[in-house]
Amino acid sequence: MIHLVPASKSDAAFLADLEAEVMRDHATALWGHFSPAEVSIFDLEATQIIQQADRRVGYVTVETSADHLRLRKLYLTPAAQGHGVGAAVLAMVQDRANQAGLPLRLSVLAPNKRALSFYLRQGLRVSETTAERVFLQSPPSVLHLPQAS
């Protein structure tokens, strides 16, 4: 079972280490180097730790704005990748967007073909591409409520 728990300051090293582990190769392919993010820039209020069997297997950062939800980060440990964890977490985030009646938006680095394929398989669509990033969006589900007579 997958659980999302709020991130805390004590998770900062885990967040930074996991980001470096999963993003280093993509950043290096794109820019020629990887510069780790400062832990202080993590918005812990928007970040949740992904736990499976009481182990941290990743994290997700989602920001809410007036017209959309932005999936900033969905990082999984290599051992958790390819086992449905990412799809389950993305479904939770998409459900949150649907409940709010907002589209879900995100971007992936252009060299990260595995992530792009994942998001396309999950039903997101490319809205824009640049030399560095592919931007994707999923519209909110449209609820068809019965009309009052």
Image (tube, rainbow, N blue to C red):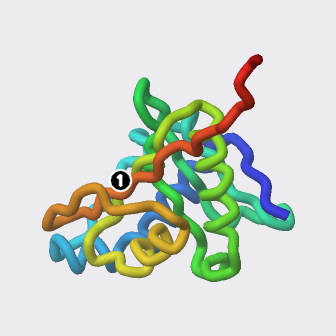
Query: Quick one: 119 or 4, which is closer to the camera?
Result: 119
Picture layout, residue 56 above or below residue 114: above
Picture layout, residue 89 above or below residue 32: above
Residue 108 percent coordinates (x, y)? 35, 64
The residue at the point 58 percent across, 45 percent down is 141
Query: Quick one: 80 or 104, which is closer to the camera?
Result: 104
In the current view of this chain or complex, which residue is farthest to the front?
A: 149
Residue 145 percent coordinates (x, y)? 71, 32
Mark 1 sits on what residue? 37
Query: Quick one: 16 or 131, which is closer to the camera?
Result: 131
Q: Quadrant of the N terminus?
A: bottom right
Q: Is residue 18 left or right of residue 4?
A: left
Identify the amino acid type marked 1: Ala
The residue at the point 37 percent across, 48 percent down is 38
Q: Is residue 50 left or right of residue 52?
A: left
Residue 128 percent coordinates (x, y)? 23, 57
For label 1, the SS is loop
- Would you call the spot at circle 1 few (<14 residues within 10 Å), some (14-19), or many (20 or more)? few
Query: Quick one: 135 or 54, which is closer to the camera?
Result: 135
Number of labels in the image equals 1
The residue at the point 68 percent across, 69 percent down is 85
